[in-house]
Image (spheres, rainbow, N blue to C red):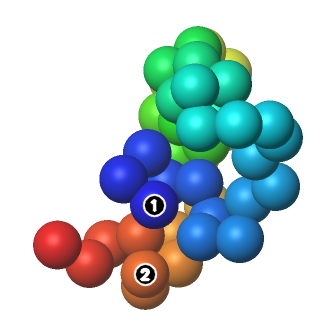
Amino acid sequence: MLQTFPADYPWQGPKTRVARQIGDAVPPLLAAHIVSAATGIPMPATQPALNAA
């Protein structure tokens, strides 16, 4: 959840492979901000869990 992936995201393989997948991924919330900035389309309302500190 640190990178805004859902807690039940289906990572595949052993721990080392999962760590690589996480390291190589673009976090969903970051991707949404990039798309919003590039297109001028406003960000959708975020889920309350994503705003929790």
The mark nearer the N terminus, 1 or 2, is 1
Q: Amino acid at mark 1?
A: Met
Local SS, label 2: helix
Quadrant location, the C terminus:
bottom left
Residue at figure coordinates x 63%, y 65% from the top left: 6
User: How far across and how far down the image is residue 28, in percent?
Assistant: 61, 42
Q: Is residue 5 above or below residue 53?
A: above
Residue at the outermost bottom position: 48
Residue at figure coordinates x 58%, y 26% from the top left: 16
Q: Which mark's residue is nearer the viewer, 1 or 2? A: 1
Local SS, label 1: loop
> Are discs 1 and 2 less than 8 Å apart at CB?
yes
Rate crowding at label 1 as few (under 14), some (14 to 19) or many (20 or more) other CA atoms within 10 Å.
few
User: How far across and how far down the image is residue 40, in percent?
Assistant: 60, 28
What number of labels is visible?
2
Q: Can residue 11 be seen by looking at this rendering?
A: yes
User: Along the line of sight, which residue is nearer the eye, 18 or 3?
Assistant: 18
Residue at figure coordinates x 52%, y 45% from the top left: 29
User: Along the line of sight, which residue is nearer the eye, 28 or 19?
Assistant: 19
Mark 1 to mark 2: distance in Å? 10 Å
User: Along the line of sight, which residue is nearer the eye, 39 or 30?
Assistant: 30
Q: Which mark is residue 1?
A: 1
User: How far across and how far down the image is residue 20, in percent?
Assistant: 58, 19
Residue at figure coordinates x 80%, y 37% from the top left: 13
User: How far across and how far down the image is residue 1, in percent?
Assistant: 45, 60
Residue at the outermost left position: 53
Rate crowding at label 2 as few (under 14), some (14 to 19) or many (20 or more) other CA atoms within 10 Å.
few
Which residue was labeled with disc 2?
49
Q: Is residue 7 above or below residue 22?
A: below
Q: Can residue 26 be seen by looking at this rendering?
A: no
Decide if residue 34 is on the left or right side of residue 53.
Answer: right
